[in-house]
Image (cartoon, rainbow, N blue to C red):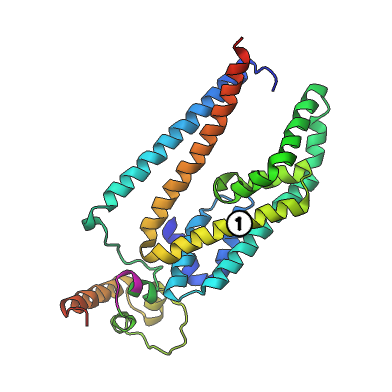
Amino acid sequence: MNELLFGYVSVYGLPIVGLAAFLSCLAVPIPTFAVMLAAGAFAATGDLVLWQVLAVAWLAAVAGDQTGFRIGRWGGAPIVESLSKRPTRAVLIERAMASIRKWGGTGVFFSTWLVAPLGPWMNLAAGASGMGWLRFTLWDGLGEAIWVCGYVGLGYLFGSELDRLTTLLGDWAGLTSSLAITALLGVILWRTVRRRAP
Amino acid sequence: MTELTGKRRVLLVGAFLVAAALSVFFAVRLGVSVVYWSDPSHIDQAFEGWMTPRYVARSWDLPPDVVADALALEQDGAGRRVTLEEIARASGRDLAALFDALEGAITDYRTRGGE
């Protein structure tokens, strides 16, 4: 799988970098970080140009996130509305949306790079919750800059052994994401247990 | 938060355990990879069709002309990006033959003491 992606990057170059960055923001399951690492590695050898790789990847990622946000804004509102027909549920949904509106900026920021698998869903939720466009775009652009510079930079610096680097970082990303989800579920569980105790 | 019903609690605990198990899985895999690759004999990578001559030069720490000579490349100075697979196809050679030529050139270069 990785070899195939490396091949696409070395044959087609920048268009593949942009396409991968865009699609990964819309929850298409491709290991985009492998594409970014490869692009960084080929920038280091001189087969691609570093600033072009960074610019294309960042713009495509931000465009992908904007698309997700728009889909959430247009498609999300009717779903939220129909879910809110039952009053008990409406209270819960309103509370969830309020917390996204309050904390969403930070959530969007971290979902673009630290817990990247959550990114596409965060975009939809942010759009559906009515978060301000400017606030979303600023946090998102900042987060994507970290993600793009991080992976392309690692590929640039350590890409002479692309296969090894990709496997290592894939496991690392899997570890941080599953730890974050474990921690989140742990906090929710802890709260329900405490609530039950007298 | 409202009181969770029994079924939801079971689901939540289940999801928590799955996420925790995944964390352990990735931690172990990461650990195994790190240990495996800290052994110097496991470091050398194999040639692949997706690699470019420049990538080979960088990864095996060779001057570009050693790689270009081994692949019988015309250096036209255009700096076009090309992969080993494309070179093999364009010149009607076998990819394996290219790898052998590279292997030979690297051994040769290193026995000469890297001049």
* Residue at the extreme bottom of the image, as rendered: B76
Amino acid under label 1?
Glu
Residue that carries the numbered disc 1 in the rendered image: A144
* Residue at the extreme top of the image, as rendered: A198
Residue nearest the observer in this picture, A72 or A105 = A105
* Residue at the extreme left of the image, as rendered: B111
Name the quadrant of the N terminus of chain A.
bottom left
From the top left corner, tell me how far across and down residue B46 is, in percent. Answer: 30, 63
User: Does the magenta-highlighted stretch encompass residue A100?
Assistant: no
| Residue that appears at 82% across and 23% down | A87
Left or right: where does residue A9 sit relative to residue B31? Answer: right
From the top left corner, tell me how far across and down residue A92 is, in percent. Answer: 75, 27
Magenta stretch: give its range.
B58-62
From the top left corner, tell me how far across and down residue A49 is, in percent. Answer: 52, 75
From the top left corner, tell me how far across and down residue A137 is, in percent. Answer: 71, 55
Q: Main secondary structure of the magenta part?
A: loop
